[in-house]
Image (cartoon, helix red, strand yellow):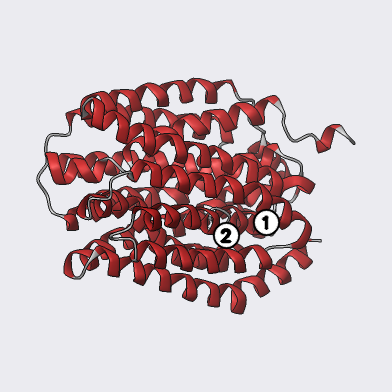
Amino acid sequence: MRHKEKLWTKDFILFCLSYLLMAAGFYFLLPTLPVFVTEVLGEDKSKIGYIIGFYALSALLIRPFSGYALDSLGRRRVYLLSMLMFTLATFLYSYAATFMWLLALRLFHGLGWGMITTGGGTIPADLVPKQRRGEGIGYFGLSITLSMAIGPLLGLWMLQETSFDFLFYATFGITAVSLGLAYLVKYPDIAHKAATVSEEQSTPKSSKKKVKMFETKASHASIVVFLFCVAYASVFSFVAVFSQENKLGHSGLFFFLLAIGVGISRPLAGKMMDRRGPNQIMLLSFLLGFAGFITLSLSSHSLFLFLLAGFIIGIGCGSIIPTLQTMIMNMVLPERRGAANATYYAAVDLGISIGSVVLGYVATWTSTAFMFRICACMFVVAGAYFFSTAYKHYLRNTLAMS
């Protein structure tokens, strides 16, 4: 019984480390590509949204298929294929000489990212005990947190000290190591178990369930995360540009403090989720997210407020995605986790893609500071929907599962 409760198994550690390195490569590029677009390719701010939006759009398109593939073909082959695509894409960035070529590459890169993050949202839930799922997903989220701290800081440093070519090849190197670690993980054979259940219960109803690519139980939490991601897209799309516009500098330090805030909130939120449920965590997250974006919008002439905003946003926003994801994992059967995560992360991608493009035009027509105020208002909308609809839906479905 004690063995079943063990959280830090060899496979869980390897998977977290692999995901950390992969995400670090992702964050090398996230704050630096906007600079590449404006300074190297000579495009205006409205085009920045497209490189984020196209990436998220392609991830959105692949998610239903990757979720279905994870559940039907097995975790290992689908996840390793996605890692291979992601690694190849990072190698090709140094050849992006035009904006259209960059957009095409972002579409291809986004396909790999969409498959990886669908698997990354599914596989940890398979590797950790059910009774410690919130805690396990919270700790797994630290892979993203640490990469969020390391990636932007190192990416911006490499850009300042070396060149874009060096940055792109470094990204390729770290993702290649990540692929090697992912190969060593022993993935759970969920697809085989699902197939066995399907054979034992071979009815038209069970066959119909097997081919469903989306999970309706994930719909309300997905709407909440969509609203959140519309606002959160602005952080990685426009903070570096905002810092340059106002001669604040230290955008790498902003992302570092953001990651520290996320690192503080995620493990605590995971344990609180397991013990008390999601309502207290989410209320605090929405309040702090609102305060953080208002602070960011007022920081045009204050480096202190700029860095403080990063820390507040990190604490407020760090627990939203894993808490909502844990809610979904608690509502679905193991053989539906791939489809549920596909539904959930499709909402993440849609929010980021729409947010990046629309907010890019808002920042161009008004100001980046005003755009951050609009993002703050999105937390009010997301909070209202969560407590009026999503939380009640969660309570009904977890009672049905027990």
Q: Amino acid at mark 2?
A: Glu
Q: Amino acid at mark 1?
A: Val
The residue that label 2 is drawn on is: 215
Quadrant for the C terminus, please: bottom right
Q: Is residue 148 left or right of residue 125?
A: left
In primary-sequence order, the first of circles 2 and 1 is: 2
Between residue 333 and residue 155, name the one nearer to us.
Answer: 155
Relative to residue 264, is residue 123 depicted above or below?
A: above
In percent of the image, x 55 and y 51: which residue is there?
A: 341
Determine whether label 2 and label 1 are within 8 Å by CB. yes
Few, some or many residues within 10 Å of mark 1 (<14, 14–19, 20+): many
Q: Give the percent coordinates (x, y) of residue 33.
A: 25, 41
Relative to residue 151, is residue 239 depicted above or below?
A: below
In percent of the image, x 35 and y 50: which residue is there?
A: 236
Q: Is residue 82 visible?
A: no
Q: Give the percent coordinates (x, y) of residue 225.
A: 50, 62
The residue that label 1 is drawn on is: 332
